[in-house]
Image (tube, grey):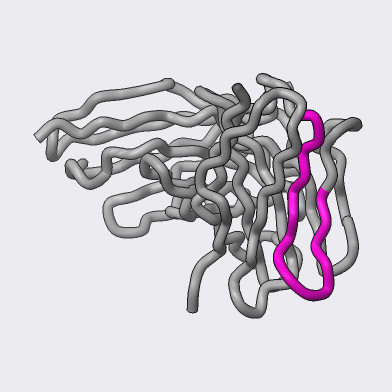
Amino acid sequence: QQQVKQSPQSLIVQKGGISIINCAYENTAFDYFPWYQQFPGKGPALLIAIRPDVSEKKEGRFTISFNKSAKQFSLHIMDSQPGDSATYFCAASLGYKLSFGAGTTVTVRA
Amino acid sequence: NAGVMQNPRHLVRRRGQEARLRCSPMKGHSHVYWYRQLPEEGLKFMVYLQKENIIDESGMPKERFSAEFPKEGPSILRIQQVVRGDSAAYFCASSPSGLGANTEAFFGQGTRLTVV
């Protein structure tokens, strides 16, 4: 079964806008929550990650918000740029095993 | 330092043939993970290997699929008697030690298998 549920499936945002992607998980044993960015024809690359004892982490224009009680976490892309157009995957790990969401295709219109 | 290298990038096989996918981890990495990505889906864990050992193959189909990571050479994911449902992108990742909160896995560019 899908251990990590991700939404929306796709989104379109204007340049300079904010992209928000949401994920929810069931297994409270997950101990690490990374986000991956994937461009067409490429492998996923780690973008930003958070541990469950932290409620927010920011790196440049990318912010993860984490709500442990609700078992939800989200990625915010501020000031979205055309170069951010990609597919984004949330994931949750239990030790070495990553469980991925289904992905969100983000299109940033100039 | 070259990244994780996978080959071939694209592989076409007829039903019933064998597919061999290769993965060379990053230099200094002795832990390899294989994932499968079906269209419109996220990556699904298949197997975790260290040199000469299979640590966890809980995500591998019970039949036709096998993986190895020999002492010398790349890791190999082998699919025997391929069927159309095996068509997917197969990604390999590597890490210097066991993956966890303080260890990042680096992914290769994937092998896109098409079964015709």
Q: Is residue B89 left or right of residue B86?
A: left
For residue B65: magenta? no
Q: Nearer the viewer, residue A95 or B62?
A: B62
Q: Residue at x 51, y 36 (%)?
A: A73
Vertical relation: B74 (above or below) A81? below
For residue A65, say whether it is visible.
yes
In the picture, which quadrant includes the C terminus of chain A?
A: top left
**Res A40 → quadrant:** top left
Q: Residue at x 66, y 66 (%)?
A: B95
Indicate left or right for A23 with A105 as reference. Answer: right
Number of numbered labels in the structure image: 0
Of B93 and A41, the residue lying toward us = A41
Near-viewer residue (B32 or B18): B18
Please give the name of the residue rendered at 59% of the width and 47% of the height, measured from the top-left corner: A33
Rendering coords of residue B36 (x, y %):
65, 37
Q: Position of residue A60 (x, y in %)?
A: 29, 58
Q: Position of residue B26 (x, y in %)?
A: 59, 71
Q: Quadrant of the N terminus of chain A?
A: top right
Q: Is residue B71 above or below residue A96?
A: below
The region drawn magenta spans B67-81
